[in-house]
Image: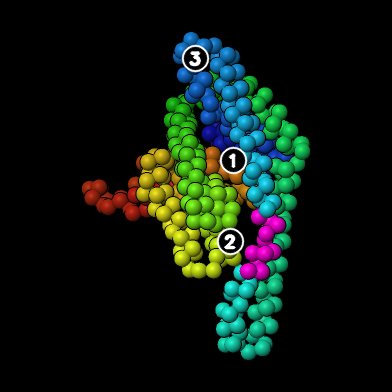
Amino acid sequence: MTTQQKTWSWVAGLIVFLAALYLLRTILLPFVAAMAVAYFLDPVCDWLEERKLSRTAATGLVTAIFFVVVVLVSAAVVPLIFGQIAEFVAKIPTYMAAIEVKIRPLLELVAAQLDETEIRDVGKSATQYAGTVLSWAARAVGEVLGGLGAVANILSLAIITPIIAFYLLRDWDRMVARIDSWLPRAQAETIRGLVTEVDQILAGFARGQAMVCMILGLMYGVGLTLVGLDFGFIVGLFTGLVSFIPYFGMLIGFVLGFGIALAQFDGLVPLLMVGGVFAVGQVVEGNFLTPKLVGGRVKLHEVWIIFALMAGGALFGFLGILLAVPVAAVVGVLARFGIAQYLGSALYSHGAPPDGNAKLPASSQASDDA
């Protein structure tokens, strides 16, 4: 088989894999969740094996403890969260009415500067945009309820995921060894190096970012509660959990919290205090949490993460969001490898001055940020 035939074979296999992933996306959630659980718990099982515990016993013990903790935490926290959300939804009309009263003077001031035709145009545009936003929100809620809230998916996550996670975790090392035996012998070391880099990026990002999100959620929740904001803990916890989306996560939480504060408080000081909580959180995250817990070893640019999350969500829904960062890590590693190969090839150096004194283009200096 020629090199060109091998390349087309890999391309065809990738296309078939992506097509199957898209067609089966509605049933893959418990399998992806189980793979994520197995990936993160494998080091714990390896540690227990080193202490003379069999792989099956270590897998059973770790899996049981993990899912018992998840069930207990969910039983304690989820009803509280859903109760707060239901109460918040019931108060939305009251909040909207209060905000309308407070911003009416500003609207009247703006209206005084416009003629009747411009006012009608602005009102028409606002109505159209509001309708678009509401339809988008309704569609998003429908997708969430139809995906995670469906009885079948909940049962699959609760019942099938632990079973799949157990078998994957028990056979993880054997599966890795089997896949390694399938690698082309000439490129095996290169592929192993790329996979190791992907593993380091995923471990550094996912584990570090999870800790950052939890710490931020507690910080925002406690801070907003101390300020006296209605549903402050839920808003803060939500803000922390969505902080894995760079910038947008905090912005969503800030808009939500500031909107509630605007409807709830009459003075300027509480509004400034709410803004201060988010400002302190951003300072702590940017200067302490992210550098210490995530660090520079995670070679994923913020823009690349945002694009991956949005693209994954648009194509595969919640499943795509789960797969976005791993896929982004793989693509990033392959892109850096491809750029390195190009910079070391004759295609790049062809025609260069023989003395080698030409300066390296600035673009190549940024290849590590791909």
Identify the magenta region.
Answer: 88-98
Query: Which secondary structure lies at badge 3?
Result: helix
Tally of numbered tags: 3
Residue shown at 67% from the left, 24% from the top: 163
Q: Position of residue 88 (x, y in %)?
A: 66, 55
Disc 1 and disc 2: Cα gap in Å? 33 Å
For marks 3 and 2, the one nearer the N-term is 3
Going by the numbered disc 3, the residue's amino acid type is Glu
Characterize the magenta stretch by its predominant secondary structure: helix
Q: Earlier in the sequence, mark 1 or mark 3?
A: 3
Q: Amino acid at mark 1?
A: Leu
Q: CA distance from mark 1 to mark 3?
A: 29 Å
Q: Name the residue at the bottom extreme.
A: 115
- Seen from the viewer's position, the closer of residues 90 and 108 is 90
Name the residue: 64% across, 85% down: 118
Q: Provide residue 84's location: percent of width, then percent of height.
A: 65, 49
Location of mark 2 (residue): 260
Labels 1, 2: front one = 2
- The image position of residue 44, as x and y in percent, is 50, 22
